[in-house]
Amino acid sequence: MKITSVKAFILHVPVTGSQIADSTHSISHWGVVGAQIDTDNGLTGYGFTGTHAHLPGDQLIARCIETCHAPLLIGEDASDITRLWQKLARNPALQWIGRAGITTLSHAAIDVALWDLKAKAAQQPLWKLLGGQAREKVRAYNTDIGWLSISDDKLVEGAQRAVAQGFTGIKIKVGSTVERDLRRLAAVRKAVGPDVTVAIDGNGKWDLATCKRFCNAAQAHDVFWFEEPLWHDDVTGHAQLAATTAIPVALGEQLYTTDAFAEFFAQQAIDWVQPDVTRMAGLTDVLRVCDTAHSFRLPVAPHAGDMSQVHVHLSYAHPACEVLEYIPWIKDCFTEPAEVVDGYFARPALPGAGTTPTAAAWAQYRQPVA
C-alpha cells in the first residue's frame, strides 16, 4: 500500500447559530484542515486538524502538509504508521522550525489519514483495529449549549433541552467574571437537578487567585471538573489549584506533546486527561498519553468528540476513556457522522476512522489551498 500522493484540503463550516464565544475566542466558522492520502491500491485516507477558520492559520497548516510532510511520505508503505510517525516527528529540518504548533497540526492530519487507510485496508472500523471494544457505551456530554455568548435564560433552556434529549452530562463556559459565572452555574445546576454531571471550562483565562476564589464558591454546585482553569502551560499553577480545591482539574486540548503531559502527570496537576488527536501529532501520540494516564489510574476524556471523529473510535477502544464531548458543528461533513443516541455516542460501523468527507461538504464548504 504505497503512498502515491498527499494533498491538503480546507473546509470552513459554520458553528451553531451565527457566532459563539468562550472566554478567549469568538468565531463564526470552524476550520477543518485536512490531508488526503492516495495509495497505489486505490484506497484513500483522510485526516484533519482544526482551526478557527482564520487566515493565515489554515493556509499555513495546509502548506506544511504539502511542502514539508508530503515529500517525506511519497513511495512509503502507508501501513507502516509507527515508523512514519517517527520519520515526520524527528525530521531534523522540521525539528529546527517547530516541535509543536503548525508542524504538529499538519502531522496530526497525516497520522489520522494513515490510520484511516489502515482500517479501510483491513475492512474494519478503527476501534476494532485498535484492539476491539473496551466498553459497551461511550457517554456524551453536551458543550454546545454552554457558550459564554449565550444569555443566562437561554443557557438554562439549552441545558434543560439537552437533558430532555438524553444527555446525562453538560459543560458550560466560564471566564467572564466570577460573579456572573457563579450565577450561571447555580442556575444550571438548579435547572438540571443533582443527577446530571455539570462541568465547567475556563479556556485558560483566569489567574490562580481568581480560580481559587471561584472554586471556593463553586464546590457547592457539585462541579464534575474545571477544565483549563489557568494558562495552558502553567504546570505549577494547576498543581497548586488541584491541591486546594475538591473540584477535579481537567486539561490537555492545548498540549502538543507527550512531554507536556508528562510534566502535568509528574506534578499531580491533572485529574481528567484530555488529549486531542488534532492538536497532538495524531492518534499515534494520543494513544501514548492514554496509556500513561491509564497507568496512573487517571480517566481520559478526549477533547471534542465529533469535532475529531476519530475520538469516538478511540473512546470505544481504550479502557482509560470514560466520557466524550459533543459539539455537532462538523459531524455531518463526514460519511459516518459522530451521532449521539439517548446520551451515548453510536458505535461506528464502517471501515476506517470516520474521517471521509461527504460530497456535499466538499461542494459546500471547501476553500482553495493557496
Image (spheres, rainbow, N blue to C red):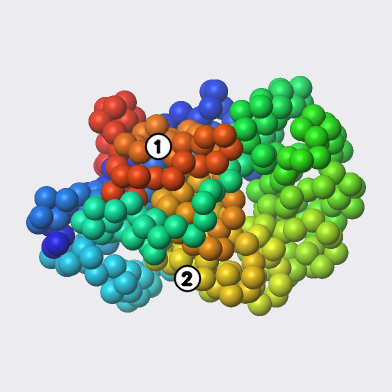
Tell me which residue sits at (89%, 52%) in the image.
216
**Distance between mark 1 and mark 2 Cα atoms:** 26 Å
**Residue 143 in view of the camera:** no
Q: Would you name the residue on which mark 1 appears? A: 337
Tell me which residue sits at (80%, 35%) in the image.
193
Q: Amino acid at mark 1?
A: Pro
- Relative to 180, say whether 175 is above or below: below
Left or right: residue 187 versus residue 263 is: right
Tell me which residue sits at (29%, 67%) in the image.
81
The quarter of the displayed image where residue 228 is located: bottom right
Q: Residue furthest left?
A: 40
**Residue 266 in view of the camera:** yes
Neighbours of disc 2 within 10 Å: few (<14), some (14-19), many (20+): few
Residue 124 on image: x %, y %: 29, 53
The quarter of the displayed image where residue 296 is located: bottom right
Secondary element type, mark 1: loop
Left or right: residue 47 versus residue 40 is: right
Tell me which residue sits at (82%, 47%) in the image.
222
Q: Decide: marks 1, 2 in contact (CB < 8 A)?
A: no
Assign the C terminus to one quadrant of the image.
Answer: top left
Residue 357 on image: x %, y %: 30, 38
Q: Amino acid at mark 2?
A: Arg
Q: Would you name the residue on which mark 2 appears? A: 288
Tell me which numbered mark, 1 or 2, is placed earlier along the sequence.
Answer: 2
